[in-house]
Image (cartoon, grey):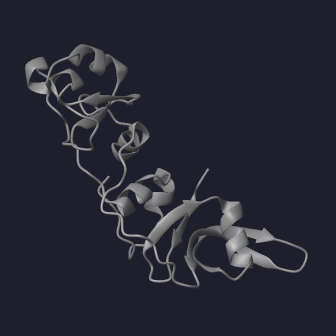
Amino acid sequence: MRDTLVLNASFEPLSTVTLNRAVVLVLQDKAVVEQAHPGLRVRAASMELPLPRVIRLSRYVRVPFRRRAPWSRRGVLVRDRHKCAYCGRRATTVDHVIPRSRGGGDTWLNTVACCAEDNHRKADRTPEQAGMPLLRMPFEPSPADAMLLSLARADLLALPKWLEQPAA
C-alpha cells in the first residue's frame, strides 16, 4: 500500500510511496520527514526514526510538465471516493453519462462512479432520459489532485493544512 506522500524540494506533491521506500529515502539522506505518524517510530540497533507520513526530497527533481491526469476506471472510482453518483451508495463500476453507443467517450467529464444496480437501471440512456439526476458533476482532476486523491482517506485528512487538498 502506498501511504507516504513524497514532496519535491519545492514542497510540490510528486508521488506516493510505500513506508519501506520512504524510510530508505530518509536513511540515505535523500529526503527529510516533514510529517510523521503520531507516536509511531522505526527502531534499529543504533538509531530511531519517526514513521514518515509526508517526506520532502532534499534535492529538487525536475519533473516533465503534465497538463492532464491520465483517465482510468480506477482513477474515476478514486476521484468519486467509491460513491455512486446517482444514489450515494458504494460504487463498483464506472458509468458513462453519455453512453458510448451515442458517442460518449472514456473521459473524466463523461464518466462517474456508479453502483451496479444503478448502472444497469440507467442502461443505454442519458441521466435525463432515465430520470436519474447526478448527485455531483464529474470533473477533471489535475495530476497533483489525482495523486493526492489516491491516498487513503485517513492519510488525506491527516495531511498538513498548508498542503493544498483537492475537493473530495
Q: Residue at x 19, y 31 (%)?
A: 104
Is the residue 36 above or below the residue 30 in the image? above
Q: Nearer the viewer, residue 45 or 143?
A: 143
Q: How many discs appear?
A: 0
Classify residue 76 as left or right of residue 105. Answer: right
Residue shown at the point (23%, 25%) measured from the top left: 100
The spot of residue 106 in percent (x, y) is 29, 36
Residue toward you, 60 or 165: 60
Q: In the image, is residue 114 above or below residue 109?
A: above
In the picture as drawn, the residue positioned furthest to the left comes out as: 128
Q: Percent x, y for residue 53?
A: 58, 67
Q: Position of residue 44 (x, y in %)?
A: 86, 72
On the image, the x and y values in percent for residue 149 come to 41, 54
Position of residue 164 relative to residue 116, above or below, is below
Q: Quadrant of residue 101?
A: top left
Considering every residue shown, the one lying at the far right of the view is 45
6 to the left or right of 135:
right
Depicted 123 relative to depicted 10: above or below: above
Identify the residue at image location x=76%, y=69%.
42
